Amino acid sequence: WSLVEKDAKRIDFFAKDLKVGKSGWEKIRDFWVQHLKPGDWWVVAGSSAIGWPKGWWRELIRDLEKKGVTVLVDSRGALLREAVEAGADWIKCNLEEAEETTGLKGVDRCVQSLKGDGTTGVVVTLGKDGLVAEVNGTPFFIRAPKVKVRDATGAGDVVTAALIFGELHGWTTDRTLRSAVRAAAWNAARDQTAEVPRTCLRD
């Protein structure tokens, strides 16, 4: 959990899963409602602190979207289910997470189950096989380039970052998703996470 300001200053709240009490969750909610403004993106990625009141994510996502904040959730399980119930703008996860969350098998069935009322896009990554998505009702299957995988750590986060980058720059969905897959493959072919080169983002 962190706040990244425009000048790239980062404020971390906590870096590992903590158990937060009811009053703590109320403070976290109030912080985001007060600080986020129309046009902002709010991204929930990875694991979370535990102990949130039932419906906390669902109600917060709805409140933020009413303010004009774009919400992307990249998670699994109960958190992701609440995001789907809230109709989060973007739902993103890998196939294992999708099947765990929905209780279904197969990427196509999972994508349909992960669409909430008002969801713009669902993106499910398939590792070396690329990704499947449905955006504004249009299905996509993007194959990943063949690379020698050295370390796939962070590849899913790269997809998320590239998705947001493309959206902010007004790219077509096809270009955005293809760039996301290329960037993730480039990341997986490296021994450690590094800055993705601009060549991965060219159409």
Image (cartoon, grey):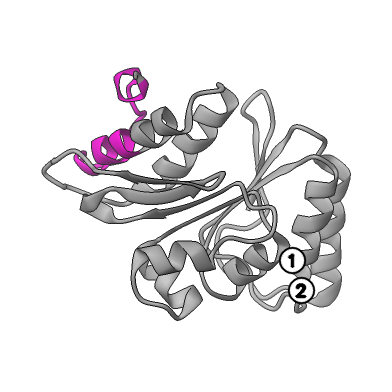
Question: Gap in Å between the C-alphas at discs 2 and 1?
Answer: 5 Å
Left or right: where does residue 37 sit relative to residue 6?
Answer: right
Question: Seen in the image, is 152 located left or right of residue 87?
Answer: left
Q: Is residue 16 above or below residue 41?
A: below
Q: Is residue 43 magenta?
A: no
The amino acid pointed to by label 1 is Arg
- The residue stretch that appears in magenta: 181-201
Residue 12 or 200: which is nearer the viewer? Answer: 200
Q: Residue at x 35, y 76 (%)?
A: 105
Q: Secondary structure at mark 2?
A: loop
Quadrant (top left/top right/bottom left/bottom right) for the C terminus: top left
Task: State the residue at coordinates (78%, 48%).
Answer: 65
Across and down, in percent, residue 19 comes to: 67, 76
Residue shown at 43%/76% (left/top)? 100
- What residue does disc 2 label? 55
Front residue of 123 and 155: 123
Labelled disc at residue 58: 1
Callout 1 crowding tier (Cα within 10 Å): few <14, some 14–19, many ≥20: some
Tell me where residue 93 appears, x and y as whole percent.
Answer: 45, 58
Residue 85 percent coordinates (x, y): 68, 68
Residue 154 in sight: no
